[in-house]
Image: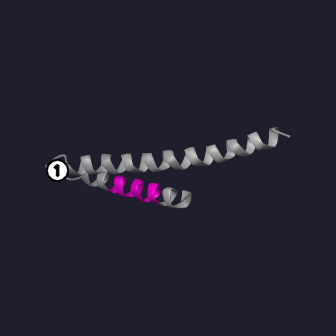
């Protein structure tokens, strides 16, 4: 599950960067690509947040179990 979140976060970051690049270098297209890029960046941020929350939660539980002895 963690690897899927990391992969989706990375892919959405790259796709969001592509849409942002398209928005910046096309004239008169409107804000559709910008909103798409921001939405995809938000998905990436959520995926990375969940990934790191799960990772640090597991490491914290391991630290607590070591100190219980």
Up-down: is 49 above or below 12? Answer: above
Which residue extends farthest right? 69
Q: Position of residue 50 (x, y in %)?
A: 50, 47
Task: Give the number of marks.
Answer: 1
Give whichever of 35, 59 is nearer the camera: 59
Residue 54 lies within the magenta run:
no
Magenta residues? 8-18
In the rendered image, residue 56, in percent from the top left (x then y), is placed at 62, 44
Q: Nearer the viewer, residue 22 or 62?
A: 62
Name the residue at the left extreme: 28
Q: Which residue is mark 1?
A: 27
Which quadrant is the N terminus positioned in?
bottom right
Residue placed at 68% from the left, 45% from the top? 59
> Considering depth in this image, is 9 or 37 the residue closer to the camera?
9
x%, y% of residue 36?
27, 51
Q: Is residue 36 above or below residue 67?
A: below
The chief SS type of the magenta part is helix
Please give left or right for residue 28 compared with residue 20 in the image: left
Could you tell whether 10 is left or right of 3 in the image? Answer: left
């Amino acid at each position: 599950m963690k690897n899927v979140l990391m992969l989706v976060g990375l892919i959405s970051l790259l796709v969001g960067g592509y849409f942002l690049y398209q928005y910046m270098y096309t004239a008169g297209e409107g804000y559709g690509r910008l909103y798409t890029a921001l939405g995809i960046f938000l998905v990436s941020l959520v995926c990375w947040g969940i990934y790191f929350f799960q990772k640090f939660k597991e490491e914290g539980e391991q630290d607590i179990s070591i100190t219980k002895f």
